[in-house]
Image (tube, rainbow, N blue to C red):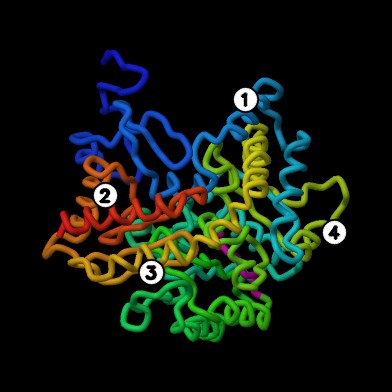
Amino acid sequence: MTSQISSNRPNDLDAFWLPFTPNRAFKRAPRLIARAKDVHYYTPEGRAVLDGTSGLWCSNAGHNRDPITAAIKRQAEELDYAPTFQFAHPKSFELASRIAALAPADLDRVFFCNSGSEAVDTALKIALAYHHVRGEGARTRLVGRERGYHGVGFGGISVGGIVNNRKFFGTLLAGVDHLPATYSREHQAFTRGEPEWGAHLADELQRIVALHDASTIAAVIVEPMAGSTGVLPAPKGYLERLRAICDRHGILLIFDEVITGFGRLGYAFAAERYGVTPDLIAFAKGVTSGSVPMGGVIARQHVYDAFMRGPERSIELFHGYTYSAHPLACAAGLATLDLYRDEALFERARALEPAFADAAMALKELPGVLDIRTVGLAAGIDLASRPGAAGARAYDAMDRAFHDEGLMIRITGDTLALCPPLIISEAQIGEMFDKVARVIRASS
């Protein structure tokens, strides 16, 4: 097959099998992006599209920020690649130190990978190995949560709780249980921030402990705010209860902060917002503002120390990736952290949260709106499904937003999700929700 492809717009869409996308529908009316700057994407024709999704929850500092692109260019000219199996390069240590300094308490050891999915699988493997090296190898059971999203590795979909991400791929990992989802529209509808109802749902962990015995359970993994399932903030007191139960039974607590890390909830990590210190934090996305793939796990000192007891020249953890701490990713990460610091973007997100919530909640009376949830700079809007066509209404809203309104939004089922870059202005927040209001009316 031969075809001529322009630099901006391909005329043959067949070869690329898009992820998490209805490929046939997309290729009939493609939503193509050619460039980006700050809070906007641009189509091949040059039409501006306001980014209401931070790319894919990742471009927290905005797009094509000059300090980040300059750092990537300099690094590519100096060192394109270096292995981190038995070797290392200076920026890997510098970035690890900077991330550790941002993390709360004694979360100060950083293991690098390349994505949120890899970060989750890494955290799960560290948790299992931690108990093994401490002589508690029977602790192999993992606990996730219904409606949780932890990437697409086999570990992540096993502890995850989104049905379509699981049901096509066999039996997955054995020995996995799930806590109930924390959302109840009856008790939490139209909540700003953390719901008052739901802390008691953490007590389901005690039931799982009673069923299997604590001596078999390695770790519990939860998102402080479940983003991909439609923006479900943790209820007040929920994470504290999980921490207390884990402490009581020697179970590691893992926070998946792939979405919530690096400012989405107004802090470097959601663990700081909620005052709860997990044993491991999985991160990715915002660490480089999406500019170069990177992820990682931050471990507490006691977790790291458990591995450091054997012979000095023995490998402590048989795990890693070819591109762990890739030089370009480290350079991008350092420049991104500089932007977060110099422009006070975490504090900016915190200051914008009330105005963001007000703008979102102003859509409450629109036709078909069942619920709106906001926390930090994230909002989920549930729409009533069309009879016999679940998901169609949100899909039409997303398509209309892009083609007719110049806005990018996220959807899951019939839920719209908004999570703009942290550099967005109050005026642009108003513009974004005005556009959302129009597409909801048009899709009703």
Residue at coordinates 74% horizontally, 37% vertically from top-left? 91
Could you say which is closer to the camera, residue 55 or residue 166?
55
Q: Alpha-carbon distance for marks 1 and 3? A: 40 Å
Label 4, residues with CA under 10 Å away: few <14, some 14-19, many ≥20: few
Residue at coordinates 18% horizontally, 66% vertically from top-left? 367
Could you say which is closer to the camera, residue 236 or residue 133?
236
The mark closer to the camera, 4 or 1, is 1
Return the disc, 4 or 3, that comes first in the chain's sequence. Answer: 4
Residue at coordinates 59% horizontally, 52% vertically from top-left? 345
As shown in the figure, which amino acid type bears the numbered disc 1?
A: Lys
Label 1, residues with CA under 10 Å away: few <14, some 14-19, many ≥20: some
Q: Which mark is residue 373?
A: 3
Q: Alpha-carbon distance for marks 4 and 1? A: 40 Å
Measuring from the top left, give residue 299's x and y in whole percent.
70, 59
Q: Alpha-carbon distance for marks 2 and 4? A: 53 Å
Judging by the rendered image, the residue that carries numbered circle 4 is: 309
Tell me, yes or no, if residue 221 can be seen here: yes
Judging by the rendered image, the residue that carries numbered circle 1 is: 73
